[in-house]
Image: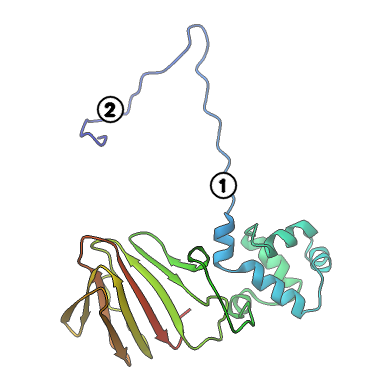
Amino acid sequence: MDRGGRRLTGKTPATRTRGKPAKRPKARKPKSPSRDQASNLAVGARLRAVRESAGMTQRQLARKAGVTNATVSLIEQEAHAPSLASLHRLLSAIPITIADFFALPVSQQNALFYQAGDLAVVTRGAADLRVLGSERRDKKLQVFIERYKPGAGTGVDPLSHDGETAAVVVSGVVEVEVDGKKNVLSAGGGYQLIGRQPYRLTNIGKTVAVVVCACTPAMI
């Protein structure tokens, strides 16, 4: 059925120009990963950090990994997201494992600043979570900017964290459930959980709820 409730038979009339065969639609080329997708994992910043730590130039790394110098340059500019195979070749040339590569902090700066579009994406959709400081894996504090559409939340299973979690509701109305007890919080309210306290959060309002949440130790 279509959106108006009409049953679709699966047959559509063929559109032809008299005397000429119908043109076949051109096959679409698969889209390459966007710049945003590349930068979310900070692949370029990480690659530049480990390359420089190994004392290699872009040209030297490219030659050793069997890729072009332009490829290395574009990756480090977050303008190209490499395939897993390409990334493996580059890291093997340094050498460093993929696990160690993503565990490394990609910045040594102690003052980090972000515009709204710069935050790393954790999840998208009805529950949209962004995080600060994703490039510093050695940080002690983690801050999330969370947006929940009406009815959305953290999920059916309770969340728990070995540390402390505190949050402030910036806008909207949410329900936070801890140990079976439900607490309704509106803009300006918040909560703090000390120790491993399983909880669930749900937007029970009619507008998008925005929550700023901090936890220590860092989760990402």
> In the structure shown, which secondary structural element does the residue marked by tag 1 occupy?
loop
> In the structure shown, which secondary structural element does the residue marked by tag 2 occupy?
loop
Residue 128 location, quadrant: bottom left
Which residue is more in the foreground, 116 or 39? Answer: 116
Which residue is more in the foreground, 91 or 122? Answer: 122
Q: Is residue 147 above or below residue 159?
A: above
Query: Which numbered circle lies on residue 31?
Result: 1
Is disc 2 in contact with disc 1, using a CB cutoff of under 8 Å?
no
Looking at the image, what colour scheme do you see? Answer: rainbow
Q: Residue furthest front?
A: 188
Disc 1 marks which amino acid? Lys
Q: Residues within 10 Å of mark 2 (few under 14, many from 20)?
A: few
**Residue that appears at 69% across and 65% down:** 76
Q: Residue furthest left?
A: 181
**Residue that appears at 25% across and 79% down:** 189
Earlier sequence position, callout 2 versus callout 1: 2
Residue 43: give x, y in percent of width and height.
62, 68
Query: Which numbered circle lies on residue 9?
Result: 2
Q: Residues within 10 Å of mark 1 (few under 14, many from 20)?
A: few
Q: Is residue 78 above or below residue 184?
A: above
